[in-house]
């Protein structure tokens, strides 16, 4: 039997992600051999980087280099932009953080506590809830997997409503939060992990009218639009918070490039606790 049809040929490409690296050779005068950098690199032992846009030299090499994939890199900068620049928080406000044990959420919650806010986070296991309350200093935390009615759950934790919501999840969590926002509340949207791998996205959010009736400002953002504020972020975080031990930071470390795929897949089922890091080489 003869078959005819079209065949698609896919060319393998290297996966890229935020990483830390040491320059072994360079023709760019701004980056010299031996410099330590963070930015977009390949999932590989050696990368050829053609564009230096979004590539940063590491100035504080006395801190763990892995921090530049997290608290001092993209996730930390994202937490700073979402909380301070977009939500303009004030002392005493009520703050809710979804996916709160992740790389961004754990930092947003601690920024809020340092400012004097009341902070509650959501996570997907008892261990993560305990981590939020006992290690990161959240006022309280909920396991969303154990809550049949998220609206009712949020009303328990926020009887006075929510001023600021850092959105990392989307779907029914966002729908419940909208019902519990206070007038003139702010929502910073930096991710919607519940929606990423769905073959058919969830039905439309039903409570968007709350944006009108409660005069809520909801804004999505991408951190690379705010790279110009990275020095300001470092000035606020490195010396006064990280070096003085005022911020607690947790990493989930996988060793070896061969373990990177499993580490990536685990993100979407909540297997990681803290920032997922893959150590390709120690030098």
Image: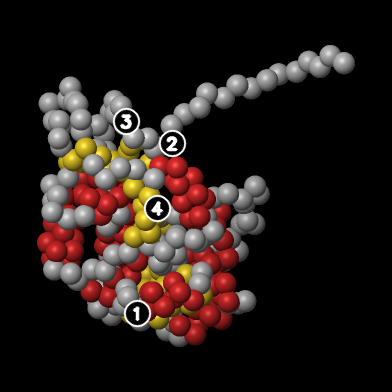
- Position of 189 with respect to 75 (left or right) is right
Gap in angstroms between the C-alphas marked 2 and 3: 11 Å
Tell me if label 1 and label 2 are in contact, CB under 8 Å: no
Please provide percent x and percent y for residue 209: 54, 65
Look at the image and name its color scheme.
secondary structure
Gap in angstroms between the C-alphas marked 4 and 1: 24 Å
- The structure residue drawn at horizontal position 49% and vertical position 85%, both measured from the top left corner, is 156
Local packing at callout 3 (Cα closer than 10 Å; few below 14, some 14-19, many 20+) is: some
- Quarter of the image for residue 216 reads bottom left
The circle drawn on residue 15 is 2
Q: Which of marks 2 and 4 is in front?
A: 4
Which quadrant: the N terminus? top right
- The structure residue drawn at horizontal position 53% and vertical position 80%, both measured from the top left corner, is 153
Tell me if label 2 and label 4 are in contact, CB under 8 Å: no
The numbered mark, 1 or 2, whose residue comes first in the sequence reads 2
Residue 180 visible in image: no
- Position of 266 with respect to 120 (left or right) is right
- How many numbered marks, from 0 up? 4
- The structure residue drawn at horizontal position 40% and vertical position 81%, both measured from the top left corner, is 140
The numbered mark, 3 or 4, whose residue comes first in the sequence reads 3
The numbered mark, 4 or 1, whose residue comes first in the sequence reads 1
The circle drawn on residue 254 is 4
Gap in angstroms between the C-alphas marked 1 and 2: 36 Å
Secondary structure of the residue carrying numbered label 4? strand
- The structure residue drawn at horizontal position 13% and vertical position 57%, both measured from the top left corner, is 235
**Position of 142 relative to 175 (above/below):** below
Which quadrant: the C terminus? top left
């Amino acid at each position: 039997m003869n078959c005819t049809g079209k065949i698609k040929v896919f060319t393998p490409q290297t996966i890229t992600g935020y990483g830390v690296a040491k320059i072994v050779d360079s023709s760019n005068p701004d980056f010299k051999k031996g410099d330590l950098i963070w930015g977009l690199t390949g999932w590989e032992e050696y990368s050829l980087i053609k564009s230096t846009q979004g590539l940063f030299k590491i100035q504080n090499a006395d801190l763990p280099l892995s921090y530049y994939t997290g608290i001092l890199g993209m996730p930390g900068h994202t937490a700073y932009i979402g909380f301070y620049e977009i939500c303009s928080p004030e002392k005493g406000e009520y703050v809710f953080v979804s996916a709160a044990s992740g790389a961004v959420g754990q930092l947003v919650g601690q920024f809020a506590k340092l400012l004097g806010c009341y902070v509650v986070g959501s996570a997907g296991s008892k261990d993560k809830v305990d981590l939020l309350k006992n290690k990161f200093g959240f006022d309280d935390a909920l396991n969303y997997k154990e809550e049949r009615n998220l609206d009712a759950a949020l009303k328990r934790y926020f009887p006075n409503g929510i001023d600021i919501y850092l959105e990392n999840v989307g779907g029914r969590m966002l729908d419940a939060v909208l019902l519990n926002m206070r007038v003139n509340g702010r929502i910073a949207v930096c991710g919607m992990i519940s929606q990423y791998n769905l073959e058919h996205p969830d039905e439309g959010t039903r409570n968007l009218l709350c944006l009108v009736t409660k005069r809520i400002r909801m804004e999505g953002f991408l951190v690379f639009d705010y790279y110009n504020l990275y020095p300001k972020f470092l000035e606020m975080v490195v010396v006064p918070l990280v070096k003085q031990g005022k911020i607690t930071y947790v990493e989930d470390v996988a060793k070896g490039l061969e373990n990177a795929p499993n580490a990536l897949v685990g993100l979407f089922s909540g297997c990681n606790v803290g920032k997922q890091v893959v150590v390709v080489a120690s030098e």
